[in-house]
Image (cartoon, helix red, strand yellow):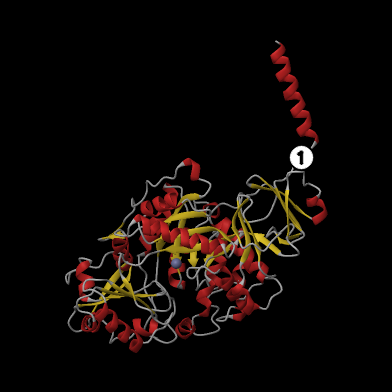
Amino acid sequence: VRISIGVLVLLLGLTACSAETEPAPDLVLANGKVFTADAAAPWAEAVAIRGSRILAVGSDAEVRALAGAGTRVVELDGRVVIPGLNDAHRHFELPVSGSHQLALTPLEPSWDELEAALRQAAATTPAGTWIEGTIGVTVMTDPHVDRERLDGLAPEHPVRLATFYGHGDIYNSLALSELGVEESEADPLGGFWERASVSGRLNGRVFEYPQWNARRRLNQEIEMAVVVERLRAEAAEMLAVGITSAQTMPMLSLHRFVDGLIEAGLPIRVRAIRFPGTEGQARLLDEDRDVSVPTRLVDRITVGGTKWILDGTPLERGAAMRQPYHDAPEQRGRLNFPAEEVAAMLRESIVADEQLLVHAVGDHALGVLLSAMESMPEVDWPPRRVRVEHGDALFPDLAERAAQLGVVVVQNPTHFALPAVVQRVGTDRGFQPLRSLLDAGIPLALGSDGPPNPWLDVMLATLHPASPSEAVTVEQAIVAYTRGAAFAELEEEEKGTLVAGKLADLAVLSQDVFMVPADALPSTRSVLTLLGGKIVHDAGELR
Ligand SMILES: [Zn+2]
């Protein structure tokens, strides 16, 4: 009896105590310039954190007053704090196991440069070694560059030239045979192996699904240790620029990707998005359906959403357009799937109760998607947050329909800086809209789809070199990279803004991104990155 009373007194005592005083924060970030990305209160001076969550955001005096004896106070000296960035569109891919990488000028190496590099690589690496190089439209659209030309330079090495924009590869004959691609190979659903116009022979070029199917097959050979090492390096690179969440469409099986994430134990949140292939005339609907994450890691690794690619890009004139291309009046691009397949994707997302993500660039592809959604008036689309990746030709008539359907757009500003895009689509057509999407009320997120430098993306979003009237402000770009990206992955209750109760994922920046000239933005770094209240990157600059 005495013990019970004692316990009771203790309990009452504790209850009374905790009712009187709020628990003190573990950490206070004081005297900063805090951009919360919360529309109701976008600016503050300090943040208090307890455990993995934000305890309070407010004026310096208010937040400092919460500190207790055990609170660590970090003086920001006016530095900018933002919610951790969330890269809404990334890929994960690796070179072929044991391959030799050609050192080429980024983006648009010339054929002369490539020829010399390939000749040298063939002379200096053992026969049978894969040789890989990254090319742009210059080489990809040169009709003289084909499998025979590559065979002439490197007959005993499998060669793959991959476009930096991911839509189109060129293989030589040995690479085709290593991939098991035969002359009689039928095109699978979703893309094609190009054939020489006279002989009908495969010319080594491959577009869309057979390209990714082949790449996925090659990537299956890669050792787990290599996957883990690359994941760790990428995570460190992301944390150093203020990214705390990444939404990734891996170019290898989701099983292996998630196994790699589990083994790597990364201090970053990753959403793994299913990106299945095709076989014969079917989409591989069940591929990677049964991937699971151990309970201890569910706050950092999530598996969700299925992505399909509906068309190509303007660079290879593969984006399916309603009007002909500006620089090739006989071409309008092509759809990877007929409209019935797009409707099936939508139905599958409802049955599986998962988010559907589609790469759709051309206005024809976008129109097919929107029409399919509109043909199911019984479905309440906005809560499903169907995602359009890129949405470059979401012209005003389509944007209005997309807004009605609650479609979320994920755009990648590095695509605004490619002169070849302007060449293909012409100027002043409202291609690659950004500001007008916000005006139309479309939820917008940003992602890199390229080099993991969100600050390059912020710069390009605020300049929009291809269409300056579509530029947004730095604040709008950061909101799209934080709150917008969290909304795009249905996680806005947990992260994306600096608000009491949310996860303490944030970055302290090396410079005031709201004040520096645009061309200084890409050099922005994070001096301190927190994930769930824990320091996961520290440049050692703060007291
Ligand atoms: Zn992409």
Task: State the quadrant of the N terminus.
Answer: top right
Q: Nearer the viewer, residue 377 or 152?
A: 152
Question: How many badges with numbers are in the image?
Answer: 1
Kind of residue indicated by mark 1: Glu
Question: Which quadrant, please, contains the C terminus?
Answer: bottom right
Residue at 30% from the left image edge and 58% from the top image edge: 220
Q: Is residue 531 above or below residue 368?
A: above
SS state under label 1:
loop
Name the spot of residue 51 as percent of width and height, x first: 65, 44
Rendered-image quarter of ligand 1: bottom left
Q: Nearer the viewer, residue 391 or 132?
A: 132
In this rendering, the answer to whether 45 lies above or below 396 is: above
- Residue 440 visible in image: no
Left or right side of 236 for 440:
right
Quadrant of residue 514 in the image?
bottom right
Query: Is 24 or 383 nearer to us in this picture?
Result: 24
Q: Please tell me which residue is depicted at 72% across the width and 24% down the height of the picture.
A: 11
The image quarter in which residue 359 lies = bottom left
Left or right for 129, reference 448: left
Q: Is residue 467 shown to the viewer in this render?
A: yes
Q: Is residue 484 left or right of residue 110?
A: right
- Provide the residue designation for mark 1: 22
Image spot of residue 279 (x, y percent): 27, 59
Circle 1: is it few (<14), some (14-19), or many (20+) Cα within 10 Å?
Answer: few
Name the residue at the top extreme.
Answer: 1
Residue 240 position within the rendered picture, expressed as x and y whole percent measured from the top left: 57, 63
Residue placed most toward the observer, 225 or 60: 225
Quick check: 488 left or right of 518?
A: left
